Each structure stands twice: as structure tokens, then as C-alpha cells.
Image: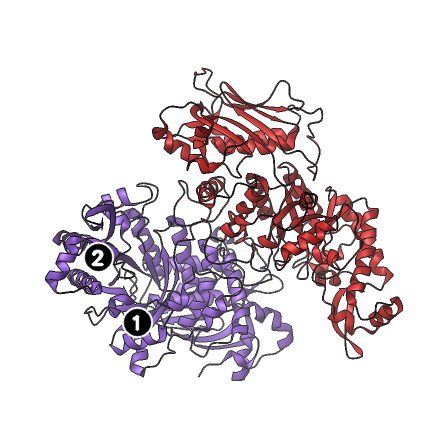
Chain colours: A purple, B red
Amino acid sequence: MYCLLKCAPLILAVAVCHGWLFGDFVEKQKELDEISLWPLPQKFQSSAVAFKLSPASFQIVHAKQSSAGPSCSILVNAFRRYFEYMFGDLKKHEKSRNKVYDSDLVELQVWITSADPQCDGYPSLQSDESYELSVDKPSAVLKAANVWGALRGLETFSQLVYKDDYGANNINKTEISDFPRFAHRGILLDSSRHFLPLKVILANLEAMAMNKFNVFHWHIVDDPSFPYMSRTFPDLSQKGAYHPFTHVYTPSDVKMVIEFARMRGIRVIPEFDTPGHTQSWGNGIKDLLTPCYSGSSPSGTFGPVNPILNSSYDFMTQFFKEISTVFPDAYIHLGGDEVDFSCWKSNPDIQKFMAQQGFGTDYSKLESFYIQRLLDIVTATKKGYMVWQEVFDNGVKLKDDTVVEVWIGNKMEEELQNVTGAGFTTILSAPWYLDYISYGQDWQRYYKVEPLNFPGTDAQKKLVIGGEACLWGEYVDATNLTPRLWPRASAVAERLWSDKSVTDVGNAYNRLAQHRCRMVRRGIPAEPLFVGHCRQEYMGL
Amino acid sequence: MYCLLKCAPLILAVAVCHGWLFGDFVEKQKELDEISLWPLPQKFQSSAVAFKLSPASFQIVHAKQSSAGPSCSILVNAFRRYFEYMFGDLKKHEKSRNKVYDSDLVELQVWITSADPQCDGYPSLQSDESYELSVDKPSAVLKAANVWGALRGLETFSQLVYKDDYGANNINKTEISDFPRFAHRGILLDSSRHFLPLKVILANLEAMAMNKFNVFHWHIVDDPSFPYMSRTFPDLSQKGAYHPFTHVYTPSDVKMVIEFARMRGIRVIPEFDTPGHTQSWGNGIKDLLTPCYSGSSPSGTFGPVNPILNSSYDFMTQFFKEISTVFPDAYIHLGGDEVDFSCWKSNPDIQKFMAQQGFGTDYSKLESFYIQRLLDIVTATKKGYMVWQEVFDNGVKLKDDTVVEVWIGNKMEEELQNVTGAGFTTILSAPWYLDYISYGQDWQRYYKVEPLNFPGTDAQKKLVIGGEACLWGEYVDATNLTPRLWPRASAVAERLWSDKSVTDVGNAYNRLAQHRCRMVRRGIPAEPLFVGHCRQEYMGL
């Protein structure tokens, strides 16, 4: 079906398996070696026949038959972006050459085949990201049902272009048919433990697109700070952010993140985690958090959201109404993890409520009581929701389309079995907590994970729609986040995009080492895998 | 003698211990909190009496009595540098104010007391880095025997300046008498496993000065690449660097590093490690490395420097003659670590030589034979040398002024006891291998090390002249080196500068968190210690 890499050490040598004709293999080796696709496409054929691309005349154009045209800003922006990745700044290469040589590739035609190219839409869980790419002279053709597949194909095309010994741009004759193995391929960033300037978030969205990630799970608020500026409740950030002006995301900032992500086929799923992880919420909203008691009097500290007051639910109703309009994605992440019961236990009003409800001393019942009402509130906004695994574990009644995120490393297989056994859609992040750094090539550990390696039926396996690499914010901020995330997250990217059989770590090393140099060349300070060098080292700082 | 921080949670609250008078303590708390000296000075008194500094009129000047003047470029450059750190770009603050208010600090007078200020010299192991700083109106006075102490005092002065609630620059009445606990306080960077662009090295020299480090141990070449461009043997980098033009340090680059370091009171000690760690040398110098054998014929691979050929010693003589002139420091690091004997063992010529010399099968004798001759060669250049501990362990005869670097973590105390027991000067790097990253606040582990905590006499303890934080290059390059080094190396900086009794981790956390924000403000992407924020986040990427 597709050519496994095991048949030859060089990625382009896969052509051998298909018996394509090509000549001087040894001499070409160096050039071929330069091409390192990441993540590896599903079906891939290439030959050593190389075409030349002249920045002065090469064009990325809408195919005549395409349903998209110059008004499709997602494509127009992507054409510019990939042209710059391939050839550098446009201005330096004013069109100046009309003669076309026999060995030239003169254009890439992008052909959107469905009636609605989705130029003005947002990517979704259902988006079709598949594409077909044919590189042959005089034109290469990239075919996709809509813009989302075209974006992935443009990335692949840009990865195929390499410089020969003379510095000339080359691309080999290639046929690719590609699609993602999993529909949800996410990165979690945490902007609460450290505030992440907009610039950092945008740079990482760029890097995500280079790795075909399609979900930005924005863990935007948490205990330490509340940087999301709410129109409905401005006091949340005014009193809950590290600083009310410099360390907040304004409505305009949020819009920019969403639009920047949309242009790259990336969904933005915000997480507003409750009832725990909400210390910073309490600064701006009176009575939202549970007062903790020391003996018979309030201690002055606060616990999770107070689940026994109607005002808490009134607040959540208004708050999530705003969130549901600000974020266009069909899903909101509602958190629900790590609720500490000690404060609830200390509070006499909570104790009374527990007795009234017949919860006994099982505080997970109180947690479920809260979550249940929250889910109803969010359901009324017509949004779907994602939750951390505890919400499922505690037996909360969930809508059929709920996405349960499995994050606890211990007994991960059992949890996947249980969640999918109960018929829920699942994403996996447990093996990919990238904040846990260690000495050496830990990317290999992330790479070797097989997400479907748990006991279950085929139907259960189908419920695992993807995974997320999580970089929690305790130890990262603008100074070190980007190199710590890349290329370690790239290992997860290939696991979630490429075929299950793509597991050769040695081959992955070679491609990934070059892919990280490509990211560096494109301005992303992706750290090295091991000893070695890039032709162009990072020149930021 | 000096006021320990334990007496109060705030650093400036030490004033309490001395009974200085000051007023509204509680109201001043926030301001006081802003000041975080790092590393902590030896003797320190401060009060809450604050003076204001106006960038429009404040000046750093040579004291009338000073032996240094406007021609002293080390000081003139330092004045500019610290003025910019404190007040930002000079151009924005054209002098425009003549009126002096009663609460103003109008100038810092820098008074070099010795006849020779050493303006044109290089720092050395013997340099006097002590200084006295008195901040009182209308002038502050910084007194030091020579420029090296003045540089340290300027850093301290700049750390004392803080902004009040109105954004105005303040400094509190302060008396400091300071000197380093250890004379050798180094950072090792490795430019062979990854090439480090000049910009990265210079940025880290800047950060070193902010932390009062005074030795850049430049592990410039090693197995993977030879980026040092030698005038005598250009083939070394031509054939041994990752790239002969883009990944090399030209003579001009090396000069710049040395001069940039000199301006900051930092010695540059290059390491040219032999006989092992020399694979990259072999590309440019014929017959330098030992041919390894597979059975009775050469395998095509090479081992350590060939110790049985006169040509090896002829090469070393010429090579180190060049090195001794290029690098002004009195010391060269000659390496000598981790020699792998397997290749020597395989080679019949080596075997024959071993028999002739009566070495039996003890290859450490052969290693010592080589090192002994090398040391004689380097001694002839009038340089002193540093070596890794194996050279001592193997019983090589060393000059009295040899500095032995203890790097093996296992049995470190025993090694310190042995090396100092034999009368040799020692530096310690074993507990400070910063390349070994782990999750969490590992800076605390580095901070808690007590270098003199080994069995030995007072005379032995005196032989430990300092230590080095080592960031080996397997996993770092321009993309991630700086945030990985800082502020983790700052922990080592305080251990090596401040008094032995400065060990309160909680107090260190508070000061270091602010010190790292100061580094960020000065353009160094120093990573966070833990959850929190800086007033100005890093705005690079």
C-alpha cells in the first residue's frame, strides 16, 4: 500500500521498492538526504528525477478548476507563507525571468475540489485534512477537498524543496497521498502559571503548522493568574491577572490568536478549568470560591468553586455564554481535574448541604453535582465539551459527544479501555507531558507510544480520536518555552499523523534532526536532538 | 561581622540588626522588596532612607583621587553599560537638568586606589576583586584597588537601584564591603558538540558578569568538531569543523571573545583536550591519531593522539606555541580526561612500544607518558596548565602551580582530599554539571553544595580555589543554551562568591527570582525558577 522506510536507509530511497527508474543513485544521495518529511506522509512515491525551481518565476497558483480563488485569504496567506519559507523574503525576488527551461517546475497548482472550499470557515474535528500532491513538470498539483487539506499539502510541498550543491532550489518527482491517522492532534500551553506574551503563542502556532498539529488547547487560566480579559466580568483579569494591563489577553489578542490559528488550520479550544484550579477567579468574583474553615471559623483561605450557592451557577451561566461566543470552536474544555476536597470538608455549610443531598461523606458526589450543573449550563450554549478524565471516573453523566482527556500516566491503558468501553470519545495526553524534562533524547519515548495499544474492540479503538502534547507552565515562560517544546512535540506530531507502522526510531532521528534545522531556518528556536549542527544555526539569541 | 539574612525575611531588613534608624518600614516594604542582590555581598548594611536618581543628571564618574581616568576603557565601557542597565538607552536621557534636590543622589564616584589601575591588563587568578561601596548623598563612592574590583562593585551598585511606585529610580543608603570567597568562578561552555555563534558566547559573558563569574572555560574543540581556526594549522578547522567558514572561530572572533571578557573582568581559559576527545583533530593532521586495528590490519578508524610518534610531539609544540600567544591567560586547560585504551591496545606498534618502555599492559602508563611530554611542551611556553582529575589520578608528575579540576561526582570528597593532600590547587565542577537536567528546581541542589565539605586540613581547604558550572554541549546550542544556563548557574555563582554561611534557600529563592527578572530585563532569556512573573517578560521569542 505504501512504502515502508525499512526498505532503505534514505527516505527517498523508498522509490526503490516501487521500481521507479532513476539514475546515479550514489551521486544523488547527498541531495536526497536533504529532504526530510515530517510527519511522514501516508503514501509516498518519489524518484531521483529532480526539477529546478526559480524563485524569480515559480508560482503557487489556484488551479483553474479550483473552487477557491484570490478571495480565499487562508490560501492566499498560505501561498505567501510557504513561498517565503522556501525562497526567503519575496521582495528580494522580484519576478524577472520569463524563460522556462525544460528542467523547471514552474508552478504549484492548488486545486480545491469541493464546492465549498471553507475559506471563511474554522477548522473542526470533522475537517477533511487529506490531500494529494503530484510533483511533475511543468506543474505540480495539490488536490484537496478544501483549504484544510491544502494547508497540510502546502507544508509537505515546502518540505520537499531542497537546495543542491550549487544552492539551487530542487524538488524531486513525487506522488503523495496523505491524510492524518488521528483527527485531534493538539498542543496544550498554560498561560496562567506564567504569562505567555502573544508573540510566543503565535510563534508556537507557526511551529504547530510545520508539524501538522491542528488543535491549540489553551489552558488559559488557573490558580496563579487569570489573564483572560472578560467583557462580562472585567474584574476577573483586573484582579486575577499578574498585572491588569501587561499580563492579560485582551479581546483583540484572543481574536488574533484564533485568526492566526485559523489561517493555519488550527482549532483553538480554550480551557476554563473548574471547580478546582480556580484560586485566581476568586479575586474578581465575590463568593465564587468556598471559604475554608479552621475549626469553627473561616480561615481566610478559599477552596474550589462553591457548589452549594446558586450565585456560582448564575456566574457560570453568564461567563460561559461569553466564552461560547468569543471562541468559535464547537468545543470548550471544562477541566474538572484535581479537585481538593479538604476545604469543602472543613466548611460547615458544605457539610450541611452534603447531608441534605444524602451524599454522606463522598465528596466526589458533590464534585459531580457541580460538574453536572456546569455541563447543563454549557450544553445550553450549544457547545460540546472536553473534560479531564476525573469527570468520567467520578461517574458524571456526560453528553454522547463529550471528549474525555486521559492524562494520568498510571493505568493509562485501563482508563482508555474504560472510557471507550463506556462509548466516549477520548484523547490521550498521559504519555506526553512534555513539562517533565529529563537528560537525553526523551523524544524517543514520546515517539514510541502507540495510542491504541490498550485492550478493546475495534469500535473502542475508533473512539480514540487523537492526543495532545502538554507543556504545563510551572517552569516555562517566554524565555524557554519554544525550544523546550520543539522538536520534542514533533515526535508526538508524527505519532498522531503518520501510519501506525512508522516506528523506526533511527530513521525518525535522521528526518527529525533535519526537520528541526528546518524549523530553526524558519525562525523557530527548536533545540537539538543530539550532537551535530544545522547549516544555518539559530541567530536569535 | 556581617548581617546574616536570617534575621529578617527581607534582604534590606538586615538594617534592623544594626539598629540603623529608619521610618515607615511597612510602607517601604514593597520598595525594599524590589532590591535583590545576587550574589550576596560579604558585608552589607542598608537603611530605608532612599535617594532618588535622575537619569538626566546622574553620573558615574572617576573620583578625583582615582588613579584611573577617561582613558581607562574598561571603566568607561563599564560606566556606559551599567548606566544603560539602570536607566535604559543613553540617547533617551540627554542631560537636561541642573537643579539638584536634597533627596538626590547625583553621582557615583569610582575611586581606584592602587597606583596601577590595570586598565589595560587582563584579569588573573591573583586579581583583587574586592571593593567598598558607600551610597550616601550627595555622592556614592565605589572604592577598589583596581578595575577588577570596580567592575564587581558597579554590578552591585546597579543591583541596588530600583523603581518606586511612581517609576522613579531610587537607591537606599547602603554600605557594602565585598570580596569573593573563591578566586576561580567559572562557566564551561562546549563549542564542539554544537557550534555556538559568537553572539551566544558574548551574551553569556554578559550574563556571567551579572553574576560575578570571572572565568570562561572555553571547551573549544572535541571529537565532533574543531571550530578553532589555527593560523599555524589551518587544516584543523578547514577539515575538522562542521563547516570551514560558517562554523569556525576566526582569529578575530577569538580576539573579540577575549576582549569582551576582559572588559567584564573575565578570564578566558581555552581547553584543548588531548590525547582523547580528539577525533576532529585527525581530519586535518596526518598521523596525529592512533590507527586502530581489527585483528592484524588497520580498521580505518582512529583512537587518541598517537603517543609513540615524535611527529605528534612536534605538532603539539607548534600548536601550543600558537595557543600560548593567542590566549593571554596564564593558564591553558589541557584536558586529559576519558582516554579510551581500546584502540591503543589493538595497535601492534603501540604494543611494541609498551613492551620497550616496560609498561606491561598498563595503558595508563602510556597515557602518563604522553601527558608528561605534553606538560613539558606547554611549560616551555611559560603557561600554567589546568587538567581534568584523571591526569592526577594516573600519577603524572605535575608542576606545583597545576590546577586539577575535579569533575567525577562519585567519591568527590575523597578526590578533593587526595588532590589537596598532594598539595595541588583544585577547582570543583563535579556537583555542577548543568547539562544533566531534571524536572523541578535543581538550582537548589547546586546551591546547597559546600565545596570545602571534605576531610582535610585548613591548608588543604585553602587549595580549593573555586569551581565551575559546566554546560556540556550534547543537547544545547544557540536555540536553548542561554535559558538552560541561567539562572541555574547563578546558584553556583553565589556559592562561589558569598560567605559560607549564606545558605538559606528560601531567602535565595526570593532574591534569585528577582535577579532572573533583572537578567531578563537586561536581555538575557533566563528561565523561570517556578510559577510567577516578571514585570517585563522576555520579548525576544
Whole-percent x and y of residue B491? 53, 46
**In which quadrant of the rendered view does residue B35 lie?**
top left
Is A489 on the left or on the right of A327, as rendered?
right
For the point 29% across and 62% down, which residue is it?
Answer: A337
Tag 1 near tag 2, CB within 8 Å: no
Same chain under badges 1 and 2? The reply is yes
Chain label for disc 2: A
Is residue B434 left or right of A325 when viewed as pictured?
right
Front-most of residues B450 and A387: B450
> From the viewer's perspective, is residue A337 above or below residue A134?
above
At x 19%, y 65%, the residue is A365
Residue A513 % position (x, y):
54, 65
- Rendering coords of residue B313 (x, y %): 84, 57
On screen, residue B484 above or below B147: below
Residue matched to label 2: A345
> Which of labels 1 and 2 is toward the front?
2
Which residue is drawn at the image coordinates 47% and 53% (left, top)? A90
Q: Is residue A383 visible?
A: no
The three-letter code of the residue at mark 1 reads: Thr
Secondary structure beneath label 2: helix
